[in-house]
Each structure stands twice: as C-alpha cells, then as structure tokens.
Amino acid sequence: MSGYLKLEVVTPEGRVFSSNVSELQFPTAFRGYYGILPEHTPVLTPMGDGQIHCVLDGIKTTLTVSGGFAEVGPDHVTILARKSETDSGSK
C-alpha cells in the first residue's frame, strides 16, 4: 500500500486539480459522502453537488463540484464534474 491516491478533477473546460492525496471525501448523487483511502474497492458513482475534501501532508484542500461522475480505483480517483473550483488550503 503506497499511502497515496492520484486524484484528478476534470471539467469540460479542462483539468482543475491533479495531485497525490492521502484521503478524500466527495458527494455522491444518492448516498451522501464517500470517504476514500488508498486500496479502496473500485467504484463508479454519479456525483452530487457539494465539496471534495482531500488531505496531503496534513494540508486539507477543498474543491466545490457540481454533478458528474467519480471513478475510484485502488490507487486513483478520477472525478469528471460539470463545474468545479478550488478553495484555499488550510492545516
């Protein structure tokens, strides 16, 4: 287990975020928020509107997303969102 996931957030305008993260949470369309750690079981789910929270080296970053889909694998998460913007990171 590497301890990191490759997170990519992509909108129709292009890539919004790409980094290795140690954990993340994202909104789904029907089941609330999913919490994802490395080695997660593969999942494909529709996204809801809300915030993606991810952590790398103790720094929490938040991205706002609107709809789309999330593909989760054991070492990566790809989020295809209709819209997204990055908020400032904090410890």
Image (cartoon, rainbow, N blue to C red):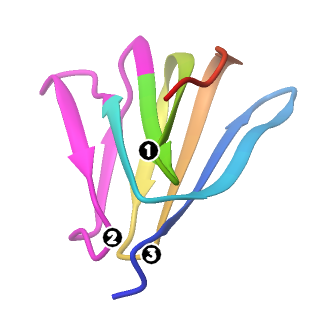
Q: Nearer the viewer, residue 37 or 60?
A: 60
At mark 1, the secondary structure is strand
Q: CA distance from mark 3 to mark 1?
A: 14 Å
Q: Is residue 8 left or right of residue 70?
A: right
Horizontal and vertical percent position of residue 29: 27, 21
Residue 73: quadrant of the picture = bottom left
Q: What residue did someone put label 2 on?
A: 38
Residue drawn at (35%, 76%) of the image? 74
Q: CA distance from mark 1 to mark 2?
A: 15 Å
2 or 3: tag closer to the N-terminus: 2
Q: Earlier in the sequence, mark 1 or mark 2?
A: 2
Q: Return the residue at label 3.
A: 75
Indicate the quadrant containing the N terminus: top left, top right, bottom left or bottom right.
bottom left
The residue under label 3 is which amino acid type?
Answer: Asp
The stretch of residues the image draws in magenta is: 27-51
Where's residue 7, x and y in %? 57, 54
Question: How crowded is the residue under tag 1: few (<14 C-alpha within 10 Å), some, or many (20+)?
Answer: many
Tell me the number on the disc at residue 70: 1
Q: Mark 2 and mark 3: span between their CA atoms?
A: 6 Å
Q: Residue furthest right?
A: 13
Q: Secondary structure at mark 2?
A: loop
Q: Amino acid at mark 1?
A: Ala
Residue closer to the observer: 18 or 42: 18
Amino acid type of disc 2? Pro
Are circles 2 and 3 on residues that touch, CB within 8 Å? yes
Q: Quadrant of residue 49?
A: top left
